[in-house]
Amino acid sequence: MASIPLRLNLGDGSVAFSFSPEAARDLHKALNDLINQLKAIALEGNKPGHKPAPQKPIEYQHTGDVFLEIFCNPNIWPSPFAAKVLITIRDERIRLSTEAELTRILEDLNQYLEQV
């Protein structure tokens, strides 16, 4: 039985690639941690006269059939709903680098995890 590919919907199209359910769960956890970090920054920034402490960027990497890297600097986004991530997918023949909405990527992961 062939495995179901992970499909990520991007701003101007989509990309599908082989991705294990275990790796998808790891990525899901990393993105949820990022969302919680963004929520905390937004709450801190709403306090009068208070500037949120700078947070470390998230850099998720996975090597399997393809190399996947997702990067986000949480300090530049006002909320999780506005945040975008930089995505790089590559193998020996092709390299794709693009930006995508964080919430859209999380929805795609949720859909993938429901299917596998």
Image (cartoon, rainbow, N blue to C red):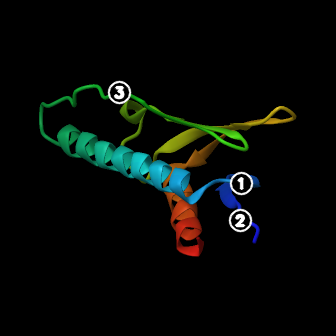
Residue 94 seen in render: yes
> Looking at this view, is 92 or 41 the one in front?
92
Q: Amino acid at mark 2?
A: Ser
Tell me the mark number nearer the camera, choosing from 1 and 3: 1
Whether residue 79 is visible, yes or no, is no
Of pointers 2 and 3, the one earlier in the residue sequence: 2
How packed mark 2 is, by other alpha carbons closer than 10 Å (few <14, some 14-19, many 20 or more), is: few
Of the two numbered discs 1 and 2 on the same chain, state the one appearing first in sequence. 2
Q: Dot 3 corresponds to which residue?
A: 56
Mark 1 vs 3, N-terminal side: 1
Question: As displayed, is residue 45 above or below residue 39?
Answer: above
Question: Given this view, does label 2 or label 3 mark the residue nearer the observer?
Answer: 2
Residue at 65% of width from left, 53% of height from top?
19
Q: CA distance from mark 1 to mark 2?
A: 7 Å
Q: Which residue is mark 1?
A: 18
Q: In the picture shown, does residue 107 fall above or below 31?
A: below
Give yes or no for contact between labels 1 and 3 (Cβ–Cβ under 8 Å): no
Query: Relative to residue 100, is residue 39 drawn left or right?
Result: left
Where's residue 1, x and y in %? 75, 72
Q: Secondary structure at mark 1?
A: loop
**Residue assigned mark 2:** 3
Residue at figure coordinates x 87%, y 34% from the top left: 93
* Residue lying furthest right: 93
